[in-house]
Each structure stands twice: as C-alpha cells, then as structure tokens.
Image (cartoon, rainbow, N blue to C red):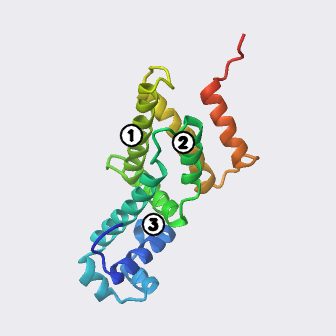
Amino acid sequence: MVENIDETSIKIMKATLVVLQREGSKASTKKIAAESGFNEVTIFRKFINKSNLINATKEYYLKLLMYKLEDVFDYAEDEKIEEFLRITFFGILVLDESDFDILRLAMEEVRESPNNKSIMLEVALFIIEKLEEFFIKQIEKGVVKDMDIRSLAVMCYNSIFQSVILWKIYSIDVGFDTNRYVDNLLNMLLEGILVQK
C-alpha cells in the first residue's frame, strides 16, 4: 500500500478528490477544508499550498489504483487466454468508485492540459505493458502465433479498459449483460470476425 501517510493527510486527500470531482480545478482550499472537517491551516501545514495538495492527492490515488491493477493483471503461468482476459475485464469493472473518480479527474486533466503526462497515460501504459508481458509468454508457450505484441496488447486494452470506461464513467449501457459482452469480445478476438469458408 501507500506508505508513510498519516490519517489526517489521507482524510484531506479524500476530501480533495470529492471536491475536485464536484468543482474541477477551481476547487478552493476553503471548500476542501469544509469537506474534510479540518481547517485551512491544517491543510497548509500538511501540504504547503493547493498545488501540492492536488498533486499529492492524484499521486496517492494513482498509487492505490496501480496496486489494484497489479493484482488484476497478475496471472498464473498455466492460465488460459480466455480466463486471463475475462478476469482482467471483470477486475477492472469492479474497481472502487474512488478508482473511477481518479480516472474521471485524469480525463479532466487531459482536457485542461493535453501536453502533460497524465494519470490516464500512466494507467494505459501500465495495462498495455502487462498485456504485452502476458502475450509474450503465450507466444513462448506456442499458444498464440508470433505477431506484433504491441498491436495485440493495444487492441485488448481498448476492448477491456475502454468498454469499462464507457460503462462506469459515461454510463453507456451496451444493452446486454457483461458476461455476454465478454463472451462476444473473446469470440471476436480468438475466432476473428470473418466468416470461415
């Protein structure tokens, strides 16, 4: 977990995330103080300024999310592709609301300053790297044919992660249950989309 952060700082960062979700970058330390139950003096004593507070909050929640993603993308040596992709999809789907809050914040961050290295980019690169690692092992075992691993990883990232983003952040319903959705994704990935002649 995230080390060496006292309980007061965690409560302030939790309140910061709530206020940032509600108000965006215009969130004031006064509103954060009211949300946290601490006064502004405590906030400034802990974080010095608003910029440090926001950066510490993003870093804290990103680390928590990355620990969870590490677990989601952990796999056994003998795990089958379908099982791994299904587990990763549902592992992302059931992340905590605070994990999706940091992703929402990250999406705002991209809109406000697209040239900065963002949380979304860090998450995307992490997931793609984990997928590449898994597929390299599958090629070595002779389960997957030798192909461009980066393309395969990016395609799976888009299928898994972006569909969860549609559901959890944009509230777009695909019109059928998630098990059917995952079955369809896996079928398209493993069997292709062309009619076999």
Rendered position, 134 above or below 100: above
Judge left or right: residue 46 versus residue 126: left
Measuring from the top left, give residue 18's x and y in whole percent: 48, 73
Residue topped by disc 2: 84
Eye-nearest disc, 3 or 1 = 1
Q: Residue at x 58, y 58 (%)?
A: 94
Q: Residue at x 60, y 29 (%)?
A: 189
Rendered position, 116 above or below 43: above
- State the residue in front, 120 or 77: 77
Q: Residue at x 59, y 37 (%)?
A: 82
Rendered position, 110 above or below 61: above
Q: CA distance from mark 2 to mark 3?
A: 36 Å
Callout 3 crowding tier (Cα within 10 Å): few <14, some 14–19, many ≥20:
some
Eye-nearest disc, 2 or 3 = 2
Residue topped by disc 1: 129
Residue topped by disc 3: 24
**Residue type at the position of mark 2:** Phe
Q: Quadrant of the N terminus?
A: bottom left
**Residue type at the position of mark 1:** Glu
Measuring from the top left, give residue 77's x and y in whole percent: 45, 39
Q: CA distance from mark 3 to mark 1?
A: 30 Å
Measuring from the top left, give residue 161's x and y in whole percent: 53, 46
> Which numbered disc flags the more N-terminal residue, 2 or 3?
3
Q: Residue at x 61, y 27 (%)?
A: 190
**Residue type at the position of mark 3:** Gly
In the current view of this chain or complex, which residue is farthest to the right? 176
Residue 141 falls in image quadrant:
top left
